[in-house]
Amino acid sequence: MTHRLTLSLWLVCAGCARPAVSPAYEAPAVVAAPATATNFATEIAQFETADRTSPPAPGGILFTGSSSIRLWPDLQKDFPNVPVLNRGFGGSTFADVLYFAPRIVLPARPRLIVLYVGDNDLAAGRTPEQVAADYATFVAFVRRELPETRVAYVSIKPSPSRWAIVGAMRRANALIAEQIARDGSAMYVDVFTPMLGANGRPLPSLFISDSLHMTPAGYAIWRAQLAPVVR
C-alpha cells in the first residue's frame, strides 16, 4: 500500500515545468457536434439553468466527465470547505465533453478541472492512442480559454465488466500519464492501481451489480486519491 501511495503521489505531482501541449494537438476553433450530442440535451440544459439561477463563483473546482462523475453520491461532503461543482453527464466520451465544455466548463471559470473520461471511448472501439490524443486536445482547449486553470485527469478505472479491454485501459492510462509527466500544469490521479486486489483483478466490493459503476467503497478510494489534488 505504501508503494502504491508513493507511486500515485509521484504521478499527481509529476512535472515541474510548464511546456506547451504538443503542436500536433491544437484546440479546434469550432467543435463539431458528435453523433451522441442529442443524448445529453436535457442534462446540459439543466446545468445551464442551474448556472443562471445560481452562478458558480470563479476559482472553484469543477468535476466533469462520464457517469462515474455524474453518480458521485455526495461530492461536496467528500471535499468539505472546497467549492466543488459536478458537471458529469453519463455515457459521455471525450468528443462529448469537448463539445459541451464551452457551455458547462467555461462559465464556471474553475481553478481546477477534475476530468474522468475515456472509459466509454475505449468501450466504443477507440484506440488508446486516440484517447490520449483526445486528452491532449482537451488540455489545449483549456489552455487557450482558461490559461490559469489546471487539469487533473483521473485514470480509467478497472471495471470488471470491461476487463476484456484492460490492455487498452492500461495503455491509454500510460500514454496520458506520460504526457502529464512533461506538463507542470496538469496532474495524473491513479485510481486504477488501488482498485485492484492482491490477485491483480478489480475488487468486487468496489462495484455495484453492473460491474461498471461504483459503490461507496469505490468512491472512497477516489476521494483518497484526489484529496491531495483538491486541497
Image (cartoon, helix red, strand yellow):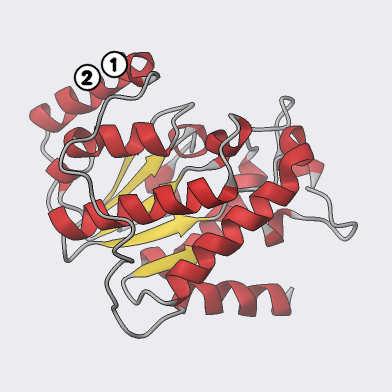
- Residue at figure coordinates x 29%, y 16% from the top left: 41
- Residue at figure coordinates x 78%, y 38% from the top left: 164
Residue 106 visible (yes or no): yes
Residue 189 visible (yes or no): no
Q: Nearer the viewer, residue 185 or 134?
A: 134
Given the image, on which type of amino acid does mark 2 rest? Answer: Ala
Mark 1 vs mark 2, CA separation in Å: 6 Å
Q: Nearer the viewer, residue 180 or 82?
A: 180
The furthest residue to the bottom? 16
In which quadrant will I find the N terminus?
bottom right
Q: Nearer the viewer, residue 30 or 146?
A: 30
Q: 10 Å neighbourhood of mark 2: few (<14), some, or many (≥20)?
A: few
Q: 10 Å neighbourhood of mark 1: few (<14), some, or many (≥20)?
A: few
- Residue at figure coordinates x 50%, y 61% from the top left: 176
Depth-wise, is mark 1 or mark 2 nearer the camera?
Answer: 1
In the rendered image, which residue does mark 1 sit on?
Answer: 41
In which quadrant will I find the C terminus?
bottom left
* x and y, in percent, of residue 115 in the image: 41, 49
**In the picture provided, is 208 more to the left or to the right than 199?**
left
Quadrant hosting residue 197: bottom right
The furthest residue to the front? 24
- Residue at figure coordinates x 34%, y 77% from the top left: 184
The kind of secondary structure element at disc 1 is helix
In the rendered image, which residue does mark 2 sit on?
Answer: 45
Compared to residue 66, the image places residue 147 above or below, namely below
